[in-house]
Image: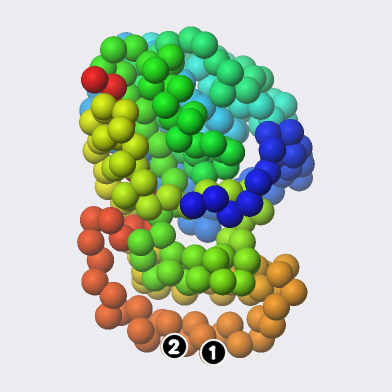
Amino acid sequence: MNSKKLNNLSLKSKYDDIYKKGAYKKFFSFNKNSIQNSLVKSIRNWQGLEVLDFGCGEGDLSNLISKKKAKMVYALDYSEKAISIAKKRFGSKKNINFQLADATKDKKKYDVIVMSGVLEHIDKPFVLLKKLLKFNLNKNGIIIFLSPSFMNPRGYVWMTLQILLKVPMSLTDIHFFSPSDITKFSKRNNCSLNFTTIAHDWGGGKKTIKDFRKRLVNALRDAKLNNKRVNKFLIWLDDAIQFFHHTNESGALMVCKLIKK
C-alpha cells in the first residue's frame, strides 16, 4: 500500500537533515542492533561473499556483516552526512567500502544485497526488487530486507489511522507491506522466499503500549487531531492486547529472504 508520494530528491534532503541533527537514533523505539542482528542471522556463512548494504546509513549493519568475514561490503547511501559518519566510525575496516551513491543506480553484481528499513521508503519498491534480482545479483544470489509489518495490534491501529484519518506513522514511510505482497512478488519473479517476523512484543505487547505513549501522541498532534484521550485508549489496549494470539507473521518487523533461482 502506498500512503503518499515523496520523490528521491526530497527524501534525500530529509535524511541529510536527520543525520545532521543526530536525530536518526530516534527512528528506533528499541535497540537497533538486535534488530539488525536478526537480518545478519539469515545467512549462516558470510565468509567470502560480496555484499551490497543498500542504504547503509551510519554503517552499523555493514559493520556487523564485516565481522562475519564477508569478502567485501559495499556500503552505499545517498546521504553525504550519513556516509561521513559511517566512515568516521568504521572506515578503517578493510572489508567495508563506504560510497556516497544512489544505490538504485548501481550496476555491480553481488552475492547478497541487504536492506534494513529501506524498502518502505522507496517510491516503487517492487520495481526496485525486480531490478536488483535481474541485474545486481549473481546466480543463486540473495536479497534480504527488513521492513515494518502490520499484521498485529500495533499495525491495526496505525493502518486505521492512516487509511481513515490520513495520520502517518512516519514522515518518510511511503509504503506498508503485507506478507501476501511479498509472497505474490516471489511467485511472479520466480524466486524462493523465506519469511519470518520478529519483535512480537513490539507488534502486540507491552512494548506496543510503551511505543504508543510517544508515537501516537506525536502523530495525532502533528495531524492537528485531539490527542488528549490517548492515555485512556492505552489503558484499554493494555488490557485487551493480552488476548491477541501471535503467529509467525505477527511480529512488528518482517525479515524476508529472496533467493534468485
Q: Residue at x 47, y 87 (%)?
A: 235
Reply above or below: 61 against 226. Answer: above
- Residue 83 has which mark? none
Q: For residue 248, which quarter of the picture? A: bottom left
Amino acid at pointer 1: Lys
Q: Residue at x 71, y 70 (%)?
A: 223
Q: For residue 77, which quarter of the picture? A: top right
Is residue 35 in sight in this rendering? yes
**Quadrant (top left/top right/bottom left/bottom right) for the C terminus:** top left
Residue 55, percent across and down? Answer: 56, 30
Tags 2 and 1 in contact by the CB under 8 Å rule? yes
Q: Is residue 182 left or right of residue 223?
A: left
Q: Residue at x 66, y 27 (%)?
A: 78
* Residue corresponding to mark 1: 232
Amino acid at pointer 2: Trp
Label 2 to label 1: alpha-carbon separation: 7 Å
Q: How is the image coloured?
A: rainbow
Reply above or below: 109 against 230. Answer: above
Crowd class of label 2 (few under 14; some 14 to 19; many from 20; radius 10 Å): few
Reply above or below: 68 against 116. Answer: above
Q: Residue at x 43, y 14 (%)?
A: 135
